[in-house]
Amino acid sequence: MGTRDYLANPTPVPAGTLVQLFFDTVNRFGEKVAYQTIRDGELLGFSYREILSRAMSVAGGLHALGIAPGERVAILSENRAEWSQTDWGALLAQVPDVPIYSTLTAPQVAFILRDSGARVVFASTEEQMEKALAARESCPQDLRVVVFDPLPDLPEGVMGWEEFLSLGKETLAHIGEDDLRARAEAVTPQDTATILYTSGTTGDPKGVILTHNNLYANLWACLQIIPVHSADSTLSFLPLSHVLQRTADYFFFSEGCTIAYARSLKTIAEDLLMVRPTKVVSVPRVYEKIYKKITDQAGLKGTLVRWAQEVGEAWAEERLAGRQPTRVLRGGYRMAHFLVFRKIHQSVGGRLEFFISGGAPLAPEINKFFYSAGILILEGYGLTETSPVLTANTLDDFQVGTVGAPIPGTEIRIAEDGEILVRGPQVMQGYFNRPEDTATAISDDGWFATGDIGEIDERGHLRITDRKKDILVTAGGKNIAPQPIESLLSKSPFVDQAVLLGEGRNFPALLIVPAFERLEAWARDAGISASDRGELLRDPRVQERMGEEGFPWFRDLAVFEKPKKIGLIRDEFSIEAGVLTPSQKVRRRVVYKRYGDLIERLYDPANMERSVFSEED
């Protein structure tokens, strides 16, 4: 298949602001439900008109606290109604907000607060308030704290949410809503809307400055290619501190949809059944978990699922190639849908029209499985620095294994070393207080260096192969892209997570977190105790089984790409453990440091006869 090195969607994109979008949307949809929260098993809604009232109160409250246009406030919170109300209120006050992941530690929170110079931090819970108070001790600026949850005996310098809103209402009564609205509408497309701190897979995070027009242009472009209407509903569960979910919520809000907030990442399955959304944005990790849960079945049910999967894949191959499946295949597919696939639809609420996937590459095998089940996953590509969307698959232009074609107004170029360069109205203004980093990332003629490696196929779709900084160079000088190799294991029912090693080494190796539910079930059937995971992974029979499950997936790789050793990890790679970023990317430096002893054993010449190890051997 041939490739290109340049691609563009020349559709002109109008300039605009999120403030004008907000007022226009409220005027159009007034009393319709905009946001929902789940409380005590019920959905509680806020209308577009109510969101306007609360956002105006937030803007008034910021004015009362002396926060001037251009100064910053921070939001340290999980997804919830107050998050969006604070965000809209800050936009109306011309005060850029700085979202902070609720999973960050107090020192990490302190760094962002100091670097951004935030004057107010909105904290969701007592736990987040304590982080903010601890961070305040190291901040040179005067920092106020507002806490969303009602708490007794608030510390000095902390204001409750309802008290803050009341202060805002009093201020509005004094200065007048018309005056505040006029100030809000004075914002320009080039004014800063938000400063988003990157996850920081290496070094300290950088503040990405996104203007009103960066986000507005991205929303407008996405609306031209992805159908959405006021009857739609969605479940918002990715962190709003990440640009993907935040822009997605703006996207749905702008067309009068209803946005329901999940209670947590752990309750997504239950919340999908309650909300019954029509369109949902997610990351590959969620699809991987759904896929493994469906395909990891034993007995007759497992046999039925595997049969349906084979029929579905054969049907998908024909449809994706533009061919009509045979009558026999169509009949088998109808039966597979009735017996297996329709239950997948029911598990996500029964009304889902499609998923939108971003944040990381989605394994083609998993996308094809969902396609065969009748659930479309529109995979796209973007970064925090690009607001975020650059490319997307659409209903009319869908191709598994790619992240789609450029959205309107976007240009893509492939550099000589394979790095993806992009240009368009969604590209950030720069990094906050880091002119040298900005100059390195964005050329004088506006091309942003993404740090990703990819290619453009002859159909005009972009393929992502890996992160430039993640490319491994072996001792023999061979370049290896980790992500395609790691994704090969995504179909294995015995593997939950995998990280490829090999930088400066003679051969690649893998660290694997097993899918313990499946492994423990196998162990019990084999008469092996599964009561302690450490002992389980030390058992030679278990190590042999994991080797038999892992190594065959690499048979089609080049010799220098094939992992020769596997290290088994007991604990899941997680955000809380510091191994994953809040956007689910692996912090490879942390992996190398945390599992250094195991890695050295994998490469110890004295252990060349063994192929699988446990971290506790």
Image: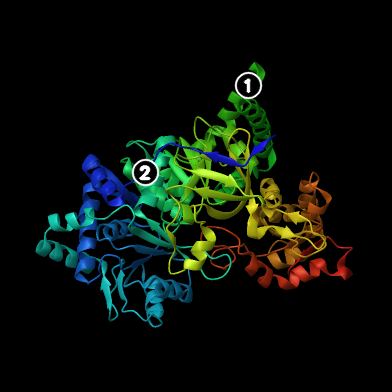
Q: Which residue is label 1 attached to? A: 323
- Callout 2, which amino acid? Phe
Tell me if residue 277 can be seen: no
Q: Which residue is label 2 attached to? A: 252
- N-term mark: 1 or 2: 2
Q: x, y (%) of residue 540?
A: 82, 62
Vertical placement of 183 versus 460: above or below?
Answer: below
Q: x, y (%) of residue 563?
A: 79, 55
* Residue nearest the observer in this picture, 395 or 82: 395
Image quarter hosting the N terminus: top right
Circle 2 Cα neighbour tier, 10 Å, few/some/many (<14 / 14–19 / ≥20): many
User: For the point 40% across and 73% down, which residue is it?
Assistant: 113
- Callout 1, which amino acid? Arg
Judged from the image, the secondary structure of the residue bearing numbered disc 2 is helix
User: For the point 65% across and 22% down, which residue is it?
Assistant: 329
Circle 1 Cα neighbour tier, 10 Å, few/some/many (<14 / 14–19 / ≥20): few
Image quarter hosting the C terminus: bottom right
Q: x, y (%) of residue 77?
A: 39, 64
**Quarter residue 146 falls in:** bottom left
Judged from the image, the secondary structure of the residue bearing numbered disc 1 is loop
Q: x, y (%) of residue 479?
A: 75, 55
